[in-house]
Amino acid sequence: MIERRPFNSLGGADHGWLKAKHHFSFASYDDAKRMGWGALRVWNDDSIAAQTGFPPHPHADMEIITYVREGAITHQDNLGNKGRTVAGNVQVMSAGSGIRHSEYNLEPETTRIFQIWIIPDERGGAPSWGTKPFPAGERSGRFVTLASGMQGDTDALPLRTNARVLGATLKAGETARYTLDKRRYAYLVPAKGSVEINGVRLDPRDGAAIREETTLEVKALEDAELVLVDASA
């Protein structure tokens, strides 16, 4: 089962400095049919104006993954962590028992991100943050694991949940495949470009909610950049 969720059907908000689209219920957008997808709770498509951002605010008991699509995001938190994550790379914040952080676009142009929240397997624990570069060439024509809490994913940023966040870049006409346990919940969004996933067309920034599939075959109809989450129930 693959349910296409067109970009123009998503909830959202326009705060001037922040233009946000929500694949799932978030803040003032409330849709009882879109409260999450397995352990995946939030997928926000955010455009953040230059020299603006999210001032310090708290989180707890959530795995928060930021995938930077364009520009860069600068993180700072009350643990003393500070870092800048650029387009194509990810950062992971495990909120644990509680963390206070800010996320700013200190660049001269708009930054665009996917912000993904996944429910952790256990509550509490010491909070943490990390970022890591992932060379674009490694993702050419195939899915590469960017963040994971699944066994064997030693090169990815760690997550405290039985989930995996993957990225891929495809040239027009290329195909990438991913093997999926049919009991799990997957969600795929093309950051750029149109694709077909098991024959279902997705245009840029559409979502695909996937269940009871064992193989995902993604064909690029044009040059494309993809983000995929493989999550537990």
Image: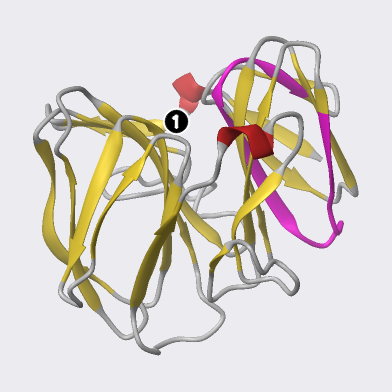
Q: Residue at x 40, y 34 (%)?
A: 87
Left or right: where 172 falls relative to 25: right
Residue 233 in sight in this render: no
**Image height of 4 relative to 31, above or below:** above
- Rendered image quadrant of residue 173: top right
**Image height of 49 relative to 42, above or below:** above
Queried whether the magenta region covers residue 65, the answer comes back as no
Queried whether the magenta region covers residue 195, the answer comes back as yes
Q: Residue at x 39, y 88 (%)?
A: 124
| Image quarter (top left, top right, bottom left or bottom right) of the N terminus | top right
Q: Residue at x 75, y 71 (%)?
A: 152
Instruction: Find residue 18 and report its horizontal and vertical position in percent.
Output: 19, 33
Instruction: Find residue 54 and report its horizontal and vertical position in percent.
Output: 15, 49
Q: Amino acid at mark 1?
A: Leu
Instruction: Find residue 206 and report its horizontal and vertical position in percent.
Output: 56, 26
Name the residue nearer the viewer: 225 or 161.
225
Main SS of the magenta part reads strand
- Rendered image quadrant of residue 202: top right
Number of marks in the rendered image:
1
Name the residue nearer the viewer: 42 or 107.
107
Residue 111 in sight in this render: yes
**Image height of 27 relative to 195, above or below:** below
Q: Magenta span covers which residues?
A: 176-196
Left or right: where 42 falls relative to 55: right
- Would you name the residue on which mark 1 appears? 10
**Image height of 174 relative to 145, above or below:** above
Name the residue nearer the viewer: 7 or 228.
228
Q: Residues within 10 Å of mark 1 (few under 14, many from 20)?
A: many
Q: What colouring method underlies this structural image?
A: secondary structure
